[in-house]
Amino acid sequence: MNLDLEAPAFSDTLAENDPPRLLHEAVVDRLRDMIVHGVLEPGTKLNERVLSAQLGASRTPLREALKYLASEGLVELLPNRGAIVAPLDRGRVKQIFAVMGALEALAGELACRNASDDAINEIRALHYQMLSHHARGDLAEYFRFNQEIHLKLVELSGNEVLASMYRGLNANVRRARYIANLSQERWNNAIKEHQQMLDALVARDGARLQKLLSDHLANKLVLVMEVLETAEKLPQP
Amino acid sequence: MNLDLEAPAFSDTLAENDPPRLLHEAVVDRLRDMIVHGVLEPGTKLNERVLSAQLGASRTPLREALKYLASEGLVELLPNRGAIVAPLDRGRVKQIFAVMGALEALAGELACRNASDDAINEIRALHYQMLSHHARGDLAEYFRFNQEIHLKLVELSGNEVLASMYRGLNANVRRARYIANLSQERWNNAIKEHQQMLDALVARDGARLQKLLSDHLANKLVLVMEVLETAEKLPQP
DNA sequence: TGCTTGTATTATGCATACAAAATGAACCTA
DNA sequence: TAGGTTCATTTTGTATGCATAATACAAGCA
């Protein structure tokens, strides 16, 4: 007899019988989230004792997680002096945007070739949800769907290597992108660009989508750079 | 009077005030080398006790290194069952080549814009060294310079994010690329392509270089795929 | 005060210890 | 023999301990 009275509360995590979750992976996800969402700001020192206590793990898996995140570029390891959240200097942001541009352009081209009609419709749906949040002036929600669209598009490429690379880079600049939306004029422009991108995708015009994505990201870069110029302290999403 | 008779022996290490080396980083480099050069073949189980003994480190830094390499895609972590050298299935190779193509194309474009004449000359020098090894039929040395050229070109982009990403992907497929050179006809073609690439770079014709690099990599992919079809066991460099 | 120097404290890097899971061999059973 | 069961061994995952480097801070001195 299996009295799993409390099971429902856990079912989310237990139902899936995929490989057992390793502690360091949980820590990686937790920390990445905290960094990406700005809870841990660039430059913050990551004290091992404090963090491991906070996350309920010992220093060993925490340190493993830090190594992993260092490889992703989210954390910087200072020998004998611990780890900090990787600072985001302007040069690096520029470089990351350049690479993301190339990746997203490639993704767009592949998506036009490979994506199913259903998948494209899913993007269209996300697009309109995004528009609705724009109409309400809800920046946070707008941004969430904006990100979803970009990530989804990259996934539609069918190239998992590309997608995972894009996600990794995106994590590095996500916060910067977020605050770069604050100008209403630019926000309106971004919407227009997204509309064009969607049209190109629906028409499966790879070459055009490629160019639109490149420009879109280049425009975004300009904004992000402006923001990094002025604000050193970034607001929370 | 400054009798620094023995100073030179130390100055090398003391002059450079770069951060002290961490053990796990040394292990990362060691393991990556062993994987890239085929000493550890794809699928090989990485026994922590054995490896740490071999490398003269305890399990802790070794495990940290494994996490790092897992993030690079060179190692696969199987929860509760250790780590293996990441297997290279054909699909993944295809995806990696697609991404490398995009990265190298971008690098070529940037290099045409940003590289100094000296830097381009350095590539030219490497090119002729490569040709000499080709003339002698020395595949191993030819390949070494071939790789150097590609890596150098990517560095000339001036985009360190791009370069480090490229290196990471290259590590994943380097061995496969090596054996894909075994056909003499293809080898001759590769030489021709390299000559054209060099010409485009010297002429700083970014658009053309971009296309040449894309094609070059696409051609290479075809070969690599053929090789992966037939040989499961790959010869050592 | 401003600066150095020495010392106490803390944090990091690595090694080791222990618990839980996986592996494998011997044995049984059909 | 094929397949399953039990239990010892091995291996992994995590926690803890210890040595060393970094930091903070107070005393001493100009």
Image (cartoon, coloured by chain):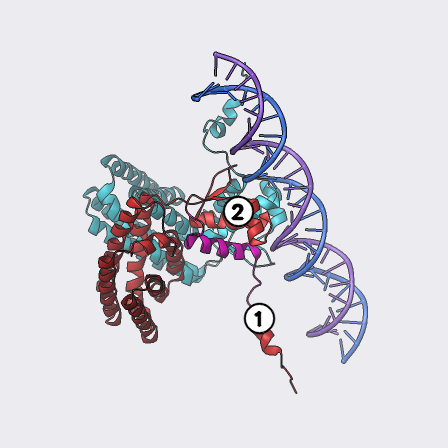
Chain colours: A cyan, B red, C purple, D blue
Q: Percent x, y for residue B164?
A: 41, 58
Quadrant, the N terminus of chain B:
bottom right
Residue in view at x 34 percent, y 75 percent: B118
- Chain letter of disc 2? A
Quadrant, the C terminus of chain B:
bottom left
Q: Which residue is mark 1?
A: B13
> As shown in the figure, which amino acid type bears the numbered disc 2?
Ala
Q: Residue furthest bottom?
A: B1
Q: Percent x, y for residue A236?
A: 47, 48
Q: Is residue A134 above or below residue A45?
A: above
Q: Are marks 2 and 1 in contact (CB under 8 Å)?
A: no
Nearer to us in this view, B225 or A80: B225
Label 1 residue SS: helix
Q: Is residue C3 left or right of residue A225?
A: right
Picture disc at residue A65: 2
**Mark 2 vs mark 1, CA separation in Å:** 31 Å
Magenta stretch holds residue A56: no
Nearer to us in this view, C10 or B73: B73
Q: Is residue B161 left or right of residue B79?
A: left
Figure quadrant of residue B3: bottom right
Figure quadrant of residue C21: top right
Mark 2: give few (<14), some (14-19) or many (20+) Cα within 10 Å: many
- Chain letter of disc 1? B
Instruction: Magenta stretch: give its range.
Output: B16-41
* Badges 2 and 1, same chain: no
Magenta stretch holds residue B21: yes
Mark 1: give few (<14), some (14-19) or many (20+) Cα within 10 Å: few
Picture disc at residue A49: none
